[in-house]
Image (cartoon, helix red, strand yellow):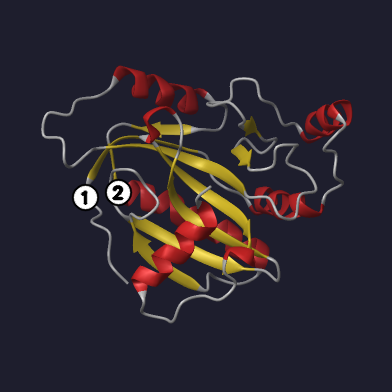
Amino acid sequence: MSIPAPDLPVHALAHRPLTPEAVAELLALPAATELREDEDATDAELARRGWTSEGAPFDGYLWTGHGHVHCCESPYAPFGDPDGLHFLAFGEVYPVDPDDEDEGHDPGLLEMMDAWEAKTGWAGLRPATVADCEAVLAQAAQAVTEQLGAGPERTVVSDATVVTGPAMTHRIWRTATHALVVGPHADNGPYGYLTHLQLSLTPLGCGPELPPAGDEKALAQWITAHVDW
């Protein structure tokens, strides 16, 4: 496995610890009661769980009752879609672009980071390093391990899922039906420039078998197939 350079800088890091309870809620969403055509019932269920779109960083995102950001592929709602893709963002990174020698802080991107840091339970660090980001990912991986009762099947360092910025660690678990990946991923928001630190939950139909151990390129492609929309 490649080793990330821990002293590489990032402009800003915001994060909120992932908990086993938040992981459990995410895992249960595909089997929840389907509410696709009933907006009132969906709104009531979101309120019951403490989820809200108020102050969400991008359209289609929801703050969960555990204080993380959820987004799903389903056009209906986050509940009861076994074929849908989900992710839970527990961190946000404003990376340094190593290819831009004249890069400075973008005020607009810093404002976006301000919004993440301002949420209750979130903490910010400016500047930060890859080591700081890796510590957040490791804590989240421990929460997944606690909930599933086993550590990740595979671990790889890759920048395949980000637009710019450093490679970081991805960790993979599988249930009977879904893949879970903790790692970095492009936020797909304005400029696609910020990076989520996230837990993704996607059907294993994207490719149930893991590549052979040691084939990091194939593993990076497997991860991309499961977390890219």
Residue type beneath disc 2: Val
Residue 161: x, y in percent? 40, 51
The reply, left or right, for residue 88 in relation to residue 83 is left
Count neighbours of disc 1 (C-alpha within 10 A) and say few if under 14, some if 14 to 19, many if 20 or more.
few
Which residue is pictured at 70% across the width and 35% down the height? 65
The reply, left or right, for residue 192 in relation to residue 97 is right
Residue 23: x, y in percent? 65, 53
On screen, 218 above or below 165? below
Q: Real-space Cα distance between discs 2 and 1? A: 6 Å
The residue tagged with tag 2: helix, strand or loop? Answer: helix
Which residue is pictured at 54% across the width and 42% down the height? 89
Residue 40: x, y in percent? 87, 25
Residue annotated with mark 2: 130
Q: CB atoms at circles 2 and 1 under 8 Å apart? A: yes
Residue type beneath disc 1: Asp
Residue annotated with mark 1: 7
Q: Nearer the viewer, residue 113 or 208?
A: 208
- Locate residue 168: give its quadrant: bottom left
The reply, left or right, for residue 132 in relation to residue 180 is left
- Locate residue 37: give its quadrant: top right
Residue 135: x, y in percent? 40, 52
On screen, 184 above or below 211? above
Q: Which mark is residue 192?
A: none
On screen, 178 above or below 124? below
